[in-house]
Image (spheres, rainbow, N blue to C red):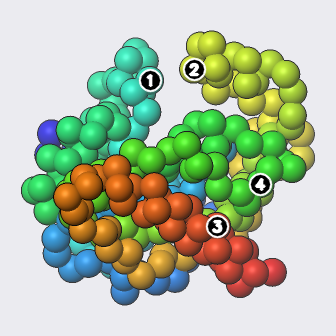
Amino acid sequence: MPVDLDDPVMDGARKMLEGMARYHRHRVHGLEHVPAEGPALFAVNHSLATYDVGLLVLAVYKRTGRIMRGLGDRSLFTTPGLRDLVPRLGVVDADPRQARRLLDAGELIVVAPGGMREALRTRAQRYTVQWDDRQGFARLAIEAGVPVILGACPRADDVFTAYKNPLTPRIYDRLRLPLPLARGLGPTAIPRPIALTHTLRAPIQPPEVGEGGIEEVLGEFHDRLVWEMEGLMVRALERRL
């Protein structure tokens, strides 16, 4: 489904994100790494705030005029109210076949490999990357032959504080419902006005697939992406301290 920039839903989302960008004094380092044309896969950390990814999408659009298509959790497309809304925002089901079609068409896509499980991290786990068992994005990049651009925004973990409790993981594992025990500004659900900065890394090219097939190179490539992202998170955090 193509993106309709004149859609009232898209226009409303843009205005909301512009307001949140001002609220968080959002900036992006490394916008020069966004290709002027052709496909690329952006992989970012997932915070409980969630909308920080939208701030990056907005910044890329304003700088380059290019639209990043988000890969969303399948629950978004089965929840009444959301299933008709998210496609109008350019978000597609995180199905490898749909993602591949977008990349083959020369589009930019953005995914948070850690998913909602990463977003539900507690305060003690903030600034960490939980991609160890998430190889799908690395496989997609290899199969499509497109570069991976990592984007880190560690301070997004400070917008809300999630507290450890036994119910949140249990409910999510059984029902796939994100119900964290969390707070924002003071005792409220208002986002804290944390200054947010995304740091983009230079594109990482996927390896060539030899006679041994994709499995021969997938593990090493995935490990490199995780290692690079962990380092990028540390450097981005140090830049803000």
Q: Earlier in the sequence, mark 3 or mark 2?
A: 2
Dot 3 surroundings within 10 Å: few (below 14), some, or many (20 or more)? some
Residue designated by label 4: 126
Residue at figure coordinates x 17%, y 75% from the top left: 37
User: Which of the two residues, 207 or 163, is positioned nearer the viewer here?
Assistant: 207
Tell me the CA gap for discs 3 and 4: 12 Å
Q: Badges 1 and 4: C-beta atoms under 8 Å apart?
A: no
Tell me the CA gap for discs 4 and 2: 21 Å
Residue designated by label 1: 75
The tag on residue 176 is: 2
Q: Badges 2 and 1: C-beta atoms under 8 Å apart?
A: yes
Amino acid type for the residue under numbered disc 1: Ser
Residue designated by label 3: 230
Disc 4, SS: loop
Dot 2 surroundings within 10 Å: few (below 14), some, or many (20 or more)? few
Q: Indicate the position of residue 182 as horizontal and vertical percent values.
A: 80, 36
State left or right for residue 61 relative to residue 166.
left
Amino acid type for the residue under numbered disc 4: Arg
Which label lies toward us, 3 or 1?
3
Amino acid type for the residue under numbered disc 3: Glu
Amino acid type for the residue under numbered disc 2: Arg
Tell me the CA gap for discs 1 and 4: 24 Å
